[in-house]
Image (cartoon, rainbow, N blue to C red):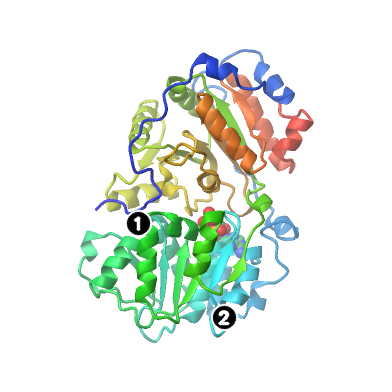
Amino acid sequence: MTSEAPTETPTENPTPSAGSLESRITKPDPAPAQSEAAQGDGASVEKGGNQLQEPEWDVDVKLSDLQGDPNNPLYSIKKFEDLKLDQRILQGIYAMNFLKPSKIQERALPLLLLNPPTNMIGQSQSGTGKTAAFVLNILMRCDLSTLQPQALVLAPSRELARQIIGVVETMGRFLENLKVIAGIPDPSQRGKKLEGQIIVGTPGTITDVIRRRLLDVTNLKVLVLDEADNMLDQTGLGDQCKRVKALLPKTVQLVLFSATFPDHVVNYARQFAPNANQITLKHEELTVEGIKQLYLDCENEQAKYEDLVRFYGLMTIASSIIFVKTRRTALEIEQRMIREGHQVAQLSGALEGVERDVIIDKFRKGEAKVLITTNVLARGIDVQSVTMVINYDIPEHPDHTPDPETYLHRIGRTGRFGRVGVAISFVHDQHSWKVLQDIGKYFDTELMRLDTSDWDAVETVIKKVIKGQRAGKTTNEMQMDGSSA
Ligand SMILES: Nc1ncnc2c1ncn2[C@@H]1O[C@H](COP(=O)(O)OP(=O)(O)OP(=O)(O)O)[C@@H](O)[C@H]1O
């Protein structure tokens, strides 16, 4: 059975053709600090030589500092003990090594736990702990003396649904009789009833099991849409979510969470979850400070392949994700990098569900260091060792306009909960450069340029970026004081 994840580019359009020299020279000059970086000594670095060491990327998080800074999304005044949680759930939280709630957890939980239950639309930056916020609410609301389904969580991909199940099970490990059931495509479960207090699945399968009366919804109390903007916006998915909601008791608490709620989805979200308490971000709060954003300036589309392989020859990175536009590109890059001796894996909607599970589990365990994927994994996936995200293809809508939301979610696969991370976007022609510039403008972020004519300089710049991160400087500050080179 293939993926139901709708976030993936549906057609296998090849990436736009290579840019002409003319298109490249119309780009503005790089900023002075960047030019300096780009000059270097002209020596190229061969694969395997002069590698950065892993510790460069494994920067310890000083969570206590971040959680004590009122401007940080991880900040809270309260402790978990103040949030009126069941003692066994608190034990689960401590077993996960959570010290204090994040801002979204501190703000959302008291509202989510209100009785009578109130709907919620919750927004906070990627990697700030939204999952725990909605999972704690669910755990608090379930009656574990029965196996009747009481909470339903919908996610856009099977990988995210499986990940959420892991969080529920870990957080609820001290709760006796807790049973969490997956509602994702699985031939071995065909025709079986879904019996457990918490069901986590993808909309297609859940619609199917409700229709076949394999999921009894009569006692459902909570419906959560994770990545809600995506779930409501996608043709097909939005309809399925609406249909699922229509089949549930009218009293169900509706909980919508995401890092992004673009304007055109907000009204729809409010209709879907009427009278919801809303926790939203200002536009300027969307980006995560710990993620440094750069771009690699490639000569043309063919050179982009060479540059990617060269880049990985130069750097030793704990774990990284390469995002591409099409399944075909994912496969091509995988084969090529394997030939070059890299430990890579590739995951797209073209693969069967079980194959996908094996691949993502391998990546989580660190058995594959590089994951090449499409937008199918752009949202929600939490692998803390991911220190770098590569946008091999810049995210755009089917009409080739910039897709800033997908960009934000993709780069948010690194820099989780206060960790640092680097996001590098590859541009190879006028169009890709313009799309990236527009995304940068949208978030009011200046992206630092890396010049592929000097790989020594690329290495130097990245080392400096990491050093700057340790010193707590922003990319803009590093550019302004010239410390980028
Ligand atoms: N209070 C906490 N203290 C420490 N770590 C936490 C806390 N809450 C969550 N985390 C960890 O932070 C990471 C990110 O959490 P989560 O995946 O829920 O983020 P998110 O906000 O849902 O991100 P995204 O928008 O990308 O889906 C996870 O590894 C989680 O275990």
Mark 2 Cα shell of 10 Å, populated few (<14), some (14-19), many (≥20): few
- Please report the residue visible at 55 percent of the width from the left and 19 percent of the height from the top: 24
Residue holding disc 2? 87
Report whether residue 95 is seen.
Answer: no
State the residue in front, 209 or 80.
Answer: 209
Tell which quarter ligand 1 is in.
bottom right
Q: Amino acid at mark 1?
A: Gly
Identity of the residue furthest to the top in this view: 42
Q: Earlier in the sequence, mark 2 or mark 1?
A: 2
Q: Which residue is mark 1?
A: 236
- Could you tell me how many numbered marks the image carries? 2
Reply above or below: 203 against 358. below
Left or right of residue 236, residue 106 in this image: right
Q: Dot 2 lies on which element?
A: helix
Residue displayed at 23% across by 65% down: 189
- x, y percentage for residue 426? 52, 30
Task: Identify residue type, mark 2.
Answer: Gln
Cα separation, mark 2 vs mark 1, equals 41 Å
Label of residue 85 in the image: none
Q: Residue furthest left?
A: 191
